Image: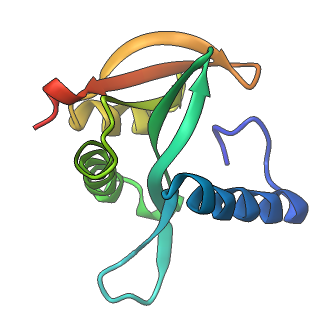
Amino acid sequence: MRFYPKTFGPADAKQWVARNQRRYREDGYGLFAVMLKDGEQVIGDCGIIKQNVVGETAMEVGYHFRRDQWGRGYATEAARACMGLAFDSFGADKVISLIRHENVPSRRVAERNGMKLEREVMHYGLPHLVYAMKREEYG
């Protein structure tokens, strides 16, 4: 939660789960649990969420991983797969990732997957970088 506006308590966590369940019902997609191949432990989540950024609605590829799993390529692999899902299955013309400036590991994930810095915006009262890739750039 280091790069979130606040740390989640139990009530926040319940709201987060409910919000993600609503996303699946209303949008048909959301965040997926990411597990190691042995299928025994969840190490994070990654997926697509509908995001409103300064009046523009876009599909965002988001990811959150346990700190002990950083640097192993899991976020890059999962985010790349979700970008493909957004373009190939959900018809996205553009995919974004909203990333706090100081979140260098997430910025590197976006850059390794070919996303380019598009602009900086205020989101939930905090400055965020918008990384983006258009359909014609994907491949």
Give the left or right position of residue 130, taking residue 112 as reference: right
Give the left or right position of residue 128, taking residue 109 as reference: right
Q: Please, is residue 128 above or below residue 49 in the view?
A: above
Q: What is the total number of numbered labels drawn onto the structure image?
A: 0
Give the left or right position of residue 67, taking residue 7 as reference: left
Looking at the picture, the colour scheme in use is: rainbow
- Find residue 72 and report its image quarter: bottom left
Q: Residue at x 51, y 32 (%)?
A: 103
- Find residue 137 and report its image quarter: top left
Q: Please, is residue 71 above or below residue 138 in the view?
A: below
Decide which of 19, 113 is in the foreground and name it.
19
Give the residue at the far left of this rendering.
139
| Horizontal and vertical percent position of residue 39 | 38, 87
Indicate the quadrant containing the C terminus: top left, top right, bottom left or bottom right. top left
Give the left or right position of residue 20, taking residue 76 as reference: right
Q: Residue at x 54, y 52 (%)?
A: 27
| Horizontal and vertical percent position of residue 129 | 50, 19
Give the residue at the far right of this rendering.
11
Q: Please, is residue 2 above or below residue 46 in the view?
A: above
Q: Residue at x 30, y 41 (%)?
A: 91
Decide which of 40, 25 is in the foreground and name it.
25
Q: Residue at x 46, y 21 (%)?
A: 130
- Find residue 14 and report its image quarter: bottom right
| Horizontal and vertical percent position of residue 53 | 59, 21
Q: Please, is residue 24 above or below residue 34 in the view?
A: above
